[in-house]
Image (cartoon, rainbow, N blue to C red):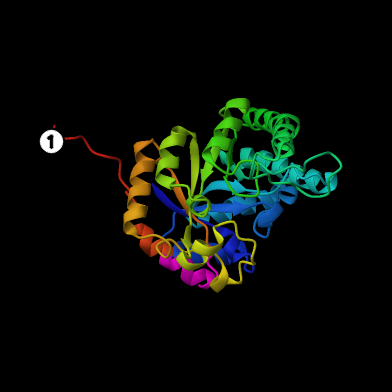
Amino acid sequence: MKLGVLTSLFQDQSLEKALDIIIELGVEAVEIGTGNFLGNAHCNPSILLEDEGKLKDFKRLIKDHNLFISALSCHGNPLHPNKSFAREHRKTIRETILLAEMLGVERVNGFAGCPGSSDSDKYPNWVTCPWPPYYSEIIKWQWEEKVIPYWKKTAKFAGEHKVKICLEMHPGDAVYCPEKFLKLRKAVGKEIGCNFDPSHLFWQGIDPIAAVRKLGDAIYHVHAKDTRIDPINSSVNGVLDTKLYSDEINRSWIFRTVGYGHSYDFWKDLISTLRLVGYDYVLSIEHEDSLMSPQEGLKKAVTFLKEIIPTEKPGQMWWV
C-alpha cells in the first residue's frame, strides 16, 4: 500500500507549495479536489480541459515532485432538487471524469447525492426511518426516479472514458452505509466502487472492519480519517448530532486525526482486512480535525500510518 493525502487542506496555498510540504513528509500520492464541496483551488477542470499549456504545467508539477494522483475528487450533490445546484454539480462531475481520462487517473471520488421528496422540493430530504408510511414512499421515489437513473447514466459515461466512480458513504446522502452502496452498485454496475472512509461509519455505529469484509473488491479507494465518539454526550443524545462542528465539547462525536479516535489495534486490523479482501492501493489522509492545525494533523497522521502500512507484497508462506 501507499500513503496519500487529499490536498484540500492546503487550499489557502498554491499547489506547488502544498506538494513541497507533502513530499517532505514522505507521502507518495495525492488526491486532488476538482470542485463542488471540495473546491477547485488546485485543479479546475473547466480550465485544464480547455488550456493545453496549463494542463501540461499541471502534469509536470506532479511529476517533478515524484508523486502520482490516486484520485480526483468532486464530492457534491448531483441529485439536489434545486435544478441549478444539481446542474452545476453534475457539470463538475462530468468534467472531472474527462480530466481524469486525460491525466490517466482511473478514479473519481464523490458522493451519490440526496434528492428531495418530490420535484417541487427546495432542499434534499434524507430519510432515516420507514414509518409513518410516507417516509417509505419517499425512499422508493428517490431511488427509482432519481438515484438509479442518474447514476446509471453517469456510470456508463465514466466507463466509456475508462474511469471508475468511487462513492463515499456519508450520512445525509442516499448512499450512507454498505447496504445502500451495494444496492446502487447492483443496479448500476461495477463502474461504481466505494471510496471507503471509516470515519463516517464510526459515528453511525457501523464496524468498519465488518464493512470492509462485506464490500470486498468493491472498495476502489480508501480515506484515512478517524472519529472520536464522546461517551458522555452520545450516551445522552445518541449520534444523530446537528450541532456545529465547532462546538466540539458538546457534540456526540468529532472527526479526528488517525490515532486520536482509535488506537493502533484498530488501524492495524483495518489495513490487514483491506489486504485480505484484495485492496493494495492508497490510503489517502483526509484532515478534518478541528483540534489540530492542518500541517500538524497531517504530520501526525503520516507518522502514525507509516509505522503500520505494509509496503511490500506478501512473500511465500515458507512455513507451510
Residue 41 sits inside the magenta stretch: no
Judge whether residue 104 can be spotted in this image: no
Q: Amino acid at mark 1?
A: Trp
Q: Quadrant of residue 176?
A: top right
Residue 56 percent location from the top left of the image: 64, 49
Q: Is residue 307 above or below residue 247?
A: above
Q: Is residue 285 above or below residue 280?
A: below
Q: Is residue 32 above or below residue 279?
A: below
Residue 66 percent location from the top left of the image: 47, 54
- Residue at image x 45%, y 41%? 211
- Secondary structure beneath label 1: loop
Judge whether residue 216 can be spotted in this image: yes
Q: Which residue is mark 1?
A: 319
Q: Residue furthest left?
A: 319
Residue 97 percent location from the top left of the image: 66, 39
**What quarter of the picture does the C terminus occupy?**
top left
Q: Is residue 150 left or right of residue 31?
A: right
- Residue at image x 68%, y 55%? 37
- Residue at image x 49%, y 34%? 218
Crowding at dot 1, Cα within 10 Å, few <14 / some 14-19 / many 20+, comes out as few
State which region is magenta.
Answer: 289-300
Q: Quadrant of residue 41?
A: bottom right
Viewer-proximal residue among 166 and 61: 166
Q: Is residue 114 left or right of residue 60?
A: right
Viewer-proximal residue among 285 and 234: 234
